[in-house]
């Protein structure tokens, strides 16, 4: 099975996945990238952080093979 690394980049931090995970195929990597992205956004929300968050997925040769990204922001309405 191919090895994939899931690196998380946000406005305030970067987490590099040195270990990686073996997955059956790219579709499984896409699903896990989206799940990881959602969890990273939730983690940032708990700490009142907004901005662009992305998950870069690398293969065993450290080539970026896909990126999942999203932006979270808070827009306050005037009183």
Image (cartoon, grey):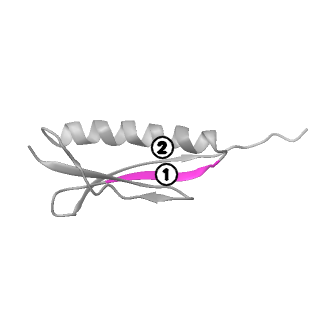
Q: Position of residue 62 (x, y in %)?
A: 22, 63
Q: Is residue 31 above or below residue 10?
A: above
Query: Which residue does the image show at 54% across and 37% down from the upper left?
Result: 42
Query: Which residue does the image show at 78% across and 42% down from the upper left?
Result: 76
Q: Position of residue 16 (x, y in %)?
A: 36, 58
Q: Position of residue 66 (x, y in %)?
A: 28, 52
Q: Give the number of the disc on residue 45.
A: none
Q: Residue furthest left?
A: 1
Neighbor class of circle 1 (other Cα within 10 Å; few <14, some 14-19, many 20+) is: many
Q: Position of residue 27 (x, y in %)?
A: 20, 38
Q: Quadrant of the C terminus?
A: top right
Rounded to the nearest angstrom, the CA distance separating label 2 from label 1 is 7 Å
Query: Which residue does the image show at 11% across and 47% down from the upper left?
Result: 2
Magenta-span inclusion, residue 55: yes
**Which element carries disc 2, helix, strand or loop?**
helix
Dominant secondary-structure state across the stretch colored magenta: strand
Is disc 2 in contact with disc 1, using a CB cutoff of under 8 Å? Answer: yes
Discs 2/1, front: 2
Asked which quadrant contains residue 15, the reply is: bottom left
Q: Is residue 55 above or below residue 34?
A: below
Q: Is residue 43 above or below residue 52?
A: above
Asked which quadrant contains residue 22, the reply is: top left
Q: Which residues are magenta?
A: 49-56
Left or right for 31, reference 72: left
Q: Give the number of the disc on residue 40.
A: 2
Residue of label 1 = 53
């Amino acid at each position: 099975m191919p090895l994939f690394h899931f690196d998380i980049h946000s406005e305030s931090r970067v987490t590099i996945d040195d270990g990686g995970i073996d997955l059956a195929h790219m579709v499984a990597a896409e699903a896990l990238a989206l799940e990881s992205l959602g969890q990273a956004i939730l983690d940032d929300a708990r700490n009142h952080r907004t901005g662009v968050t992305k998950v870069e997925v690398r293969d065993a040769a450290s080539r970026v093979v896909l990126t999942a990204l999203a932006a979270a922001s808070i827009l306050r309405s005037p009183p």
